[in-house]
Image (cartoon, coloured by chain):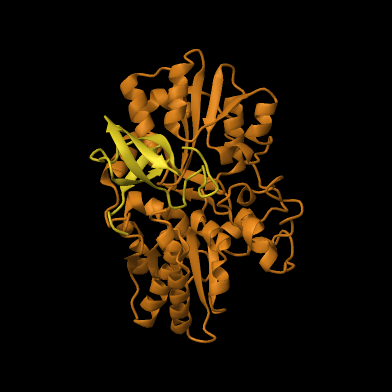
Chain colours: A orange, B yellow
Amino acid sequence: MKYVDEYRDPALARGLAAEIHSLVRPGEPVRVMEVCGGHTHAIYRHGLEELLPPEIELVHGPGCPVCVIPMGRVDDAIALAETDGVTLATFGDMLRVPGGRGSLLEAKARGADVRMVYSPLDALALAAQEPERHVCFFAIGFETTAPATAVTLLRARAAETPNFSVFCNHVLIEPPLRAILETPGLRVDAFVGPGHVSSVIGTDAYRFIPEEYGRPVVVSAFEPVDLLQSIAMLLRQRAEGRCEVENQYTRVVRREGNRRAVAAIAETMEPREDFEWRGLGVLPLSALRVRNAFAAFDAERLFTLPGARVEDPKACRCGDVLTGQIKPWECGVFGTACTPERPLGTCMVSSEGACAAFFSYGRLRRPREEAPVGG
Amino acid sequence: MTPSPERCPTCADEAVAACVRSVEGLEAVIVVDQDTERVAIDLVPDARPGDVLLCHAGIALERLESTP
C-alpha cells in the first residue's frame, strides 16, 4: 500500500539501525521520549526497541488522548448519558475507560443510550435523524481531533441543529510537555514529536523545547522506517552539536501546520483556565472549552454535571507511566489485575496506551521485572 | 471511518493516507482498504480526485505530498 510499504522496508530499517548504532557513544545513555501514543503503539508492534543499541532508552510520553482523561470527566459523561432524552455519542475507546462509577459501556448495559461513532459529524447526523433525542458528543483528543469537533460545531450552527451539543474535553500538547520538562529529577534528552498533531499545529509549535529547555525535537511519522529515521536525526543533532526542531514527516507536516484547522479551532473553542490530567494533575490553559458564540451547543452550559474530582485507584500507576517514570511492566497490577479485557487504568484501555501496547506486543519478549506497587 | 487493526478509532495515529475518488461540495469519497468512505474536506477545500489526504475522525486534515 502506498505511503505504508515503503516505510516498512526491512533493508531501509536495517540501514537506519546501523546508523543509530554508529551514532551512540558507548556507555552514554540517551533517553528519548516519544510523545505520541501512536508512536508507542508502533514501537511495540514492530519491535523497534530490539533494533536499538542498549544506550537508547525509549520513554513513553503523555500523548494518548484516552489515557489522560481523568475519572471525574468519565463520570460527567455517564451522568449525561443517564439524563432523560439524551443520547451520548463518543469514540469506541472511551466506552471502556473506567470512571468512579464504572464505564460508559456499563452505563449502556444499565439502559443509558450510549452510541459509538467514528466522527463527531456522525453524532451530528444522528441528531438530525433522531430529532426527539438530544445527541451529545463526548469530545476527547489533542489538536489532531479538535478540528473535527470544530468543523462539526460550525456545521451544527449553520444547520441550526437544536438537539446537538458537545461535551468538550479536548486537550493541548504544549502544557503537558512543559510539565514533563519541569518535573524534578526527570531526565529526557530528546523528543520524538507527534506527527498528526503537528499536521494541525505545525513544527514551529515545538520551538520552545530547544529554545527554553535545550532538548532537540524531531517530528515523526508512524511507520518503522519513519521512527528509526527520527531517532537517527536526533542522534545526528547531538553528534553535530545542534539542538533544534526538525521535521521527519515532511510528506504531511508543514512548519506552519494547517491554518484552516487552527482557525476553525480558535473560532469554536477557547482555552480553559485549567484542566485535570491523569498523572500530571491540574495544568493551566491545557484544554479547550466551547466558546460563548457556540453556547447553544455546549453540554456544560446546557446540563448540570457532577464535576467531581475522582482519585485514581491506588494500585494503578498510569500517572507514572504517562510521565515516563516507570515502564508499563513495572506497575504491580500490569497483566494481572489490569489487562485489556478488564482495564484498571486508562493506559490499558486504548490501543495507543503504553500498557496496552506492551501487553499486546512487547511482553513476550521481555521478562517481567518486579517493582514496588504504589510508590 | 471504519476501524481496522492498522489504526486506532480514537485518533487514527497510524498512517492513514486515503486517495480521493470524487469530490462533491465539501465532501470527498476516499478509498480506504479497497472500501469507499466519505470525509469532510472543510479544512482541505481544494482537494481533487487523485489527491492523497490524511484523514481522521471523518475529516481530511491535510494533503500528502505527491511523492513520498
Residue A183 percent across, percent down from the top left: 52, 64
Residue A344 percent across, percent down from the top left: 69, 47
Image quadrant in which you'd find residue A296? top left
* Residue positioned 60% across, 56% down in the render: A357
Q: A300 or A128, which lies in front?
A: A128
Residue A60 percent across, percent down from the top left: 54, 62
Q: Kindly give the residue lying farthest to the top in the view shown.
A: A132
Q: Kindly give the residue lying farthest to the left in the view shown.
A: B46
Residue A339 percent across, percent down from the top left: 71, 50
Q: A232 or A193, which lies in front?
A: A232
Q: Is residue A185 visible?
A: no
* Residue positioned 48% across, 85% down in the render: A25
Q: A287 or B51, which lies in front?
A: B51
Image quadrant in which you'd find residue A112? top right
* Residue positioned 60% across, 39% down in the render: A72
Q: Is residue A106 above or below residue A55?
A: above
Q: Is residue A129 visible?
A: yes
